[in-house]
Image (cartoon, helix red, strand yellow):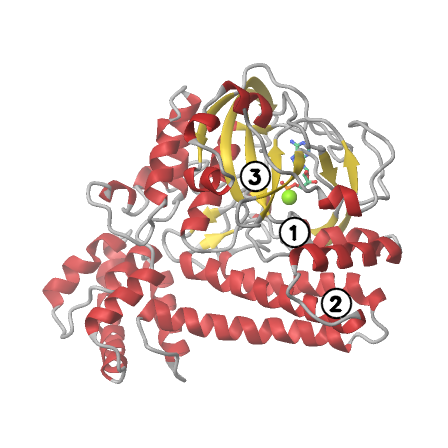
């Protein structure tokens, strides 16, 4: 028998919609009561051991028929109070009004053995008042992508919402994957997401946009009380301290994304977590060849607002929207401006830290940013794999050795002609780098260890996820489990799993799902 201890603070402490059910409507409150829509034949395809353990579940329980029934939305456990959260957002730079959980339904907040709070949420659980014209469902391909990337991100040590399980619904969902007028049925799925809080920047923007300062204040006070209990003070000073912490967490998150080559793809303000977690894995992607202008999102292919290199600046813009939303709580905006300044400072510090860690330096020094920038420019011009290049750099011989270096870096180039053209520039850069290392106190063994902890060997390359998806759509989910297994230890060499560490194969260069993705999830 599954059982959890629930403490449903969100629905207990914040005003809820008096209307029940999924009829689409404008909602003035913070959430709406709505039941998941049952599905035909739920089945667990994969689950996260670590998340199951955190929630006190044994493997046998996750694979029980009861688990599939509950976490596909067919049955409630005692203490569950299903709801969809209300929020708004700036999408692609424009205020979009009320959005809300259109296909995510939270079941409740559990408290684990060590006092950690986990909201349990089903993504793809059916219509809610926020579904607008859509069906509230999710397709298998995007659910696999969210499931895998949530856990991969966690194992990389980067703040993220988590995924407990991936379930097939046994039902089909119709999607026009390429937005070209050819809708087709696809297998449906549900991801069980978990996080201490799913509040977003847009959760605060919505009441502010309506001039509802009362609800805005309630939300802020609730969030501070539940999610930031360590903050002290009161009144404006407390809210300012909270905003500054949100800014700093967001800055650190951006530096982490840049460190590992993650591109979120849809950094709308409704997709930025107030906890500084990576949230809402849609048309995200991972950098193969280093290209700051790359975006995986076909919907954004023209303007590239959410391209890789732009992410820290977009996060700052988003914080500006959040600051604007919070301004009715302040007599003077200076404290909010200080919070924005804290973002700039925190990002600079985090970027310097990432530079030092990726290059294996004991600490950042003036000039190291230029050293890194030169390498990045060279990678972009020469079409070099970011992950492989940095991992190889950790094994650089102490003294110049062209033959060993040719072998070391061979796998990181995508284009032989560009490798040829860029080889001398690499030699020049390596000379600078070695000179810098000579002035660094760290001894080589310790340096290599430090670099391996900053430069993952395994990342969830787009084509790896796509291969798992292709197999799962043919009825074999074992590829999902295999990829998850590899991504559990991204910084370790895993003998026998070299295939997961290679550069993107040529066939994946322009393939849908591998190089480009739509929002049609
Ligand atoms: P996203 O960009 O995926 O974070 O979604 C933006 C908004 O669209 C959110 O309010 C989602 O809940 C909603 N949405 C996306 N897909 C669906 C769907 N299949 N059914 C209902 N709502 C959806
Ligand atoms: Mg979203």
Alpha carbons under labels 1 and 2: distance apart: 23 Å
Residue 402, picture quadrant = bottom left
Give the image location of residue 444, x and y in percent. 20, 73
Alpha carbons under labels 1 and 3: distance apart: 20 Å
Please determine whether, in this image, residue 333 is positioned above or below residue 503.
Answer: below
Q: Which residue is mark 1?
A: 268
Asked if disc 3 is less than 8 Å from ligand 2, the answer is: no
Q: Which residue is mark 3?
A: 193
Instruction: Give the crowd class for mark 1: few <14, some 14-19, many >=20 residues within 10 Å.
Output: many
Which of discs 1 and 2 lies nearer the camera? The answer is 2
For marks 1 and 2 on the same chain, the one whose residue lies earlier in the sequence: 2
Please determine whether, in this image, residue 329 is positioned above or below residue 101.
Answer: below
Q: Which residue is mark 2?
A: 239
Q: Is residue 182 visible?
A: no
Asked if disc 1 is less than 8 Å from ligand 1, the answer is: yes
Q: CB under 8 Å between callouts 2 and 3? A: no
Q: Is residue 242 left or right of residue 144?
A: right
């Amino acid at each position: 028998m599954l059982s959890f201890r629930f403490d449903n603070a969100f629905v207990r402490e914040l005003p809820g919609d008096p209307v029940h059910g999924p009829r689409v409507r404008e909602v003035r409150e913070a959430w709406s009561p709505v039941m998941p829509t049952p599905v035909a034949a739920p089945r667990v395809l994969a689950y996260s051991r670590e998340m199951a353990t955190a929630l006190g579940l044994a493997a046998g329980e996750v694979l029980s028929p009861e688990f599939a029934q509950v976490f596909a939305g067919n049955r409630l456990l005692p203490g569950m109070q299903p709801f969809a959260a209300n929020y708004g957002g700036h999408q692609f730079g424009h205020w979009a009004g009320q959005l809300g959980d259109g296909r995510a339904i939270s079941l409740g907040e559990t408290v684990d053995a060590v006092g950690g709070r986990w909201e349990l949420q089903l993504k793809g659980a059916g219509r809610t008042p926020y579904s607008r014209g859509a069906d509230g469902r999710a397709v298998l391909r995007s659910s696999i992508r969210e499931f895998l990337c949530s856990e991969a991100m966690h194992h990389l040590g980067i703040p993220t919402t988590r995924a407990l399980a991936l379930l097939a619904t046994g039902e089909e969902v119709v999607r026009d994957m390429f937005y070209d007028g050819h809708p087709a049925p696809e297998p449906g799925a549900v991801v069980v997401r978990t996080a201490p809080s799913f509040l977003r920047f847009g959760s605060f923007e919505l009441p502010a946009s309506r001039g509802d300062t009362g609800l805005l204040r309630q939300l802020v006070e609730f969030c501070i009380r539940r999610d930031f209990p360590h903050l002290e003070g009161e009144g404006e000073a407390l809210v300012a301290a909270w905003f500054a912490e949100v800014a700093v967490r967001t800055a650190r998150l951006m530096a982490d994304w840049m460190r590992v080559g993650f591109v979120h793809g849809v950094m709308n303000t409704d997709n930025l977590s107030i906890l500084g977690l990576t949230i809402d894995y849609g048309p995200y992607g991972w950098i193969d060849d280093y290209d700051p202008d790359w975006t995986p999102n076909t919907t954004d292919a023209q303007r590239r607002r959410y391209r890789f290199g732009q992410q820290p600046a977009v996060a700052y813009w988003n914080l500006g929207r959040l600051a604007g939303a919070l301004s009715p709580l302040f007599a003077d905006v200076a404290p909010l401006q200080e919070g924005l300044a804290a973002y700039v400072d925190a990002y600079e510090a985090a970027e310097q830290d990432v530079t030092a860690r990726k290059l294996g330096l004991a600490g950042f020094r003036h000039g190291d940013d230029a050293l890194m920038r030169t390498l990045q420019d060279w990678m972009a011009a020469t079409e070099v794999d970011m992950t492989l290049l940095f991992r190889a750099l950790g094994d650089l011989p102490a003294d110049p050795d062209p033959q060993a270096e040719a072998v070391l870096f061979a796998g990181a180039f995508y284009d032989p002609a560009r490798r040829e053209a860029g080889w001398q520039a690499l030699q020049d850069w390596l000379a600078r780098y070695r000179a810098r290392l000579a002035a660094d106190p760290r001894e080589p063994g310790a340096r290599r260890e430090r670099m391996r902890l900053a430069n993952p060997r395994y990342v969830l390359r787009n084509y790896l996820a796509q291969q798992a998806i292709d197999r799962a759509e043919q009825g074999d989910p074992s590829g999902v489990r295999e990829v998850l297994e590899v991504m559990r230890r991204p910084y370790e060499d895993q003998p026998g799993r070299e295939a997961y560490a290679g550069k993107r194969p040529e066939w994946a260069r322009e393939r849908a799902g591998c190089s480009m993705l739509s929002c049609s999830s």
